[in-house]
Amino acid sequence: MVSKKIETQSMDELVRLFGPFDENIKAISQEFDVRVIMQDGECCVLGEDANVEKALAVLNKLKEFIYNGDSVDIGRVNYLCDCAKADKLDEVDELMGDAVAITNRGKPIKCKTVGQKKYVDLMKKKTITFGVGPAGTGKTYLAVAIAVNEYKAKKVEKIILTRPAVEAGEKLGFLPGDLQEKVNPYLRPLYDALQEMFGNETFSKMMERGVIEIAPLAYMRGRTLSNAYVILDEAQNTTKEQIKMFLTRLGENSKMVITGDLTQIDLPKGLTSGLKHAVKILKDIDDIGIIKLNERDVVRHPLVQKIVKAYETEDK
């Protein structure tokens, strides 16, 4: 057993490290089988030498995030613990850079995992980017953030977002309204992300002017999408023919991002996911970037990460 002091510059910093109701320190203690105690008036980590070193490494990295003005919520704590166990804690330094985007209310949007940072870097560099991963990894949200940045920088003239109208168990025919009203529930996540970036009033005006277009994938057929940032969401529910049709819409001065989760395919039996097929055959083409996010990149409630991991284990 060893005991090592937690070095902090102030009581306020120690309080932030511990988190609300000490949830941060409790999570670290549980992950590394250590105890945090008061010893001779100092806050110390007690446990086996290797475990204490990893716990302190996570705490020191959390302090760096505090100095950088970033949040140190329980999601970040759990992610840093996973990185420490995999001896990849040094990789998170790149997360302390500039914000990906700023919301309408002035909130900075930053990558929360190394996987997200690599995804963002690909979207900035490549003409076509595939972001594949489970729910909660920020695939769609970050793609919308980059699209908004490109528009504000006048690199594109419009933003186009689309999804295949494939139901997860429900039937469109039972929903009220015309076709557009029927598919709106499937496009809701895209509306929400854009409204957060632009604000409701600006978003509505841009929709009216056609600067922002949100439509089912079927509406893309026969078009050439030029001077636009185009996002295809839920691409796991496209067929091979549909995703080929979409990719070949690419026009001059445009970029495309294709996102999807290969564990949530809702296509009828016998049909191959277009996303799965495209990732396989396009992986070696220059100017096409492909990133596969995993459960460590889940940034929703910590329980979501455990659910994703359980299903992945079952599938294997």
Image (spheres, rainbow, N blue to C red):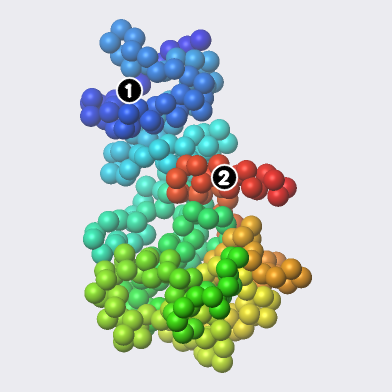
19 over 282 or under it: above or below: above
- Give the side of residue 179 with respect to residue 74, left or right: right
Q: Using the numbered discs, state the Cα–Cα distance from disc 1 to disc 2 in whole angstroms.
A: 35 Å
Residue farthest along the right direction in this orientation: 270
Q: Where residue 288 appears, x then y in whole percent? A: 58, 70
Q: Where residue 9 appears, x then y in whole percent? A: 25, 26
Q: Is residue 24 visible?
A: yes
Residue at horizontal 39 percent and vertical 31 percent from the top: 24
Residue farthest along the top direction in this orientation: 40
Q: Where residue 170 appears, x then y in whole percent? A: 57, 68
Residue on which disc 1 sits: 7
Residue at horizontal 27 percent and vertical 81 percent from the top: 205
Give whichever of discs 1 and 2 has the lower sequence position. Answer: 1
Give the numbered dot on residue 307. 2
Residue at horizontal 51 percent and vertical 63 percent from the top: 122
What's under tag 1, amino acid-wise?
A: Glu
Secondary structure under the numbered disc 1 in the rendered image: loop
What's under tag 2, amino acid-wise?
A: Ile
140 over 137 or under it: above or below: below
Residue farthest along the bottom direction in this orientation: 222
Residue at horizontal 45 percent and vertical 81 percent from the top: 177
How many numbered dots are placed on residues in this image?
2
Cβ atoms under marks 1 and 2 closer than 8 Å? no
66 over 181 or under it: above or below: above
**Which of the two residues, 38 or 119, is positioned nearer the viewer here?**
38
Q: Is residue 231 visible?
A: no
Which of pointers 1 and 2 indicates the residue nearer the eye?
A: 2
- Neighbours of disc 2 within 10 Å: few (<14), some (14-19), many (20+): few
